[in-house]
């Protein structure tokens, strides 16, 4: 399975990629009290790349519920960061946004991936990606981004999500985005209860059968709810979720701790497929 991210092409048949998370926001779960300035963004990205990230995902709006963020504010947060990272690092850059206007600006600044958690709700999103030659992440979400779900209920959560992802990926291809540039994400904790999110994680092998690289975002609220742990105490829980996901067919690990995710991916590649680690010493 070949995954194309900008000028980078990856064989992900046996080795998962790592998408390091960079959140220049004021309400990030990992850095809740810090609004990243540009220098801090670059330092954080440098650490992610040194730790083995194949992709750096820049998002200017926290995924979960929170205060509204205007389009101008989101642009101000992500575009200068992407420009700076594009000039400094030879890795694919992703922009986490559901706004087509922000995605277009991000592609112009050097991003090659659009990571949309809204299910392509903006009608201009896919045409913008196709015009830029960008890859896209199609994510399942039941209601919409940043909206608390009052009824996280599904009769067949795995079947519903599989059908939704197949539809979204099909829409991306129909818009002119080549199959090798389409990824899918089950959207753990986006309109699903913790129990349903675990069904999706355990069902990764079913979702992988769709034939698109499967992104795993094993987010902190979900894992913290399992064991009643604080965000800062979730390292081992995240590692366990990543290992289960990779064994089930996930091929991109989206993580704050790129070093730990890289080790999970490389160890499993070495064990399962006899693929030697590509980032020794990390």
Image (cartoon, rainbow, N blue to C red):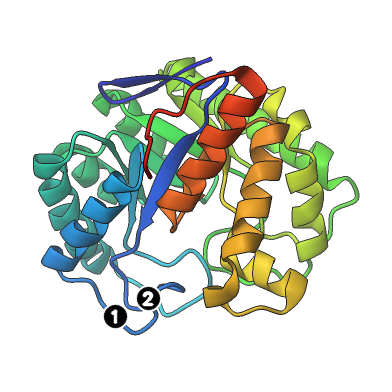
According to the picture, the residue beneath numbered tag 1 turns out to be 34
| Observer-nearest of 44 and 138 | 44
Label disc, if present, on residue 140 of the rendered structure: none
Label 1 neighbourhood size at 10 Å, few (<14), some (14-19), many (20+)? few
Q: Note whether residue 251 is visible.
A: no
Is 8 located above or below residue 205 in the figure? above
Residue 270: image quadrant is top right
255 with respect to 203 (left or right):
left
- Secondary structure under tag 1 reads loop
Is 28 located above or below residue 100 in the figure? below
Residue ID at (68%, 27%)? 208
| Observer-nearest of 46 and 60 | 46
What percent of the width, then of the height, locates residue 64? 53, 69
Residue 189: image quadrant is bottom right
Image quadrant occupied by the C terminus = top left
Which residue is the extreme one toward the right?
A: 155
What percent of the width, then of the height, locates residue 153? 83, 60
Discs 1, 2 touching: Cβ within 8 Å = yes
Is 79 located above or below residue 265 in the figure? below
Label 2 neighbourhood size at 10 Å, few (<14), some (14-19), many (20+)? few
Count of numbered tags:
2
Label disc, if present, on residue 31 of the rendered structure: 2
Residue ID at (61%, 58%)? 238
- Secondary structure under tag 2 reads loop
Which residue is the extreme one toward the bottom?
A: 33
What percent of the width, then of the height, locates residue 198? 78, 54
Q: Note whether residue 213 is visible.
A: yes
Residue ID at (40%, 18%)? 176
């Amino acid at each position: 399975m070949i995954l194309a991210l900008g000028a980078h092409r990856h064989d992900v048949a046996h080795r998962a990629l790592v998408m390091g998370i960079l959140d220049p926001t004021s309400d990030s779960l990992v850095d809740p009290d810090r609004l990243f300035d540009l220098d801090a963004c670059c330092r954080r990205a440098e650490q992610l790349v040194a730790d083995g990230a194949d992709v750096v995902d820049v998002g200017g709006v926290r995924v979960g519920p929170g205060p509204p963020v205007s389009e101008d504010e989101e642009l101000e947060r992500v575009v200068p960061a992407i420009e700076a990272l594009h000039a400094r690092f030879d890795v694919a850059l992703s922009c986490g946004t559901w706004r087509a206007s922000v995605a277009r600006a991000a592609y112009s600044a050097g991003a090659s991936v659009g990571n949309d958690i809204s299910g392509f709700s903006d009608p201009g999103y896919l045409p913008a990606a196709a015009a830029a030659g960008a890859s896209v992440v199609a994510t399942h979400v039941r209601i919409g981004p940043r909206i608390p779900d009052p009824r996280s209920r599904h009769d067949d959560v795995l079947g519903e999500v599989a059908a939704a992802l197949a539809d979204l990926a099909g829409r991306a291809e129909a818009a002119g985005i080549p199959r090798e540039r389409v990824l899918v994400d089950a959207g753990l904790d986006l309109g699903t209860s913790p129990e349903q999110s675990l069904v999706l994680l355990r069902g990764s092998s079913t979702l992988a059968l769709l034939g698109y690289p499967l992104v795993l975002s094993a987010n902190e609220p979900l894992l913290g709810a399992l064991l009643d742990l604080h965000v800062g105490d979730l390292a081992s829980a995240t590692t366990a979720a990543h290992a289960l996901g990779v064994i089930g067919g996930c091929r991109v690990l989206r993580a704050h701790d790129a070093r730990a995710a890289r080790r999970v991916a490389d160890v499993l590649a070495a064990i399962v497929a006899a693929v030697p680690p590509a980032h020794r010493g990390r």
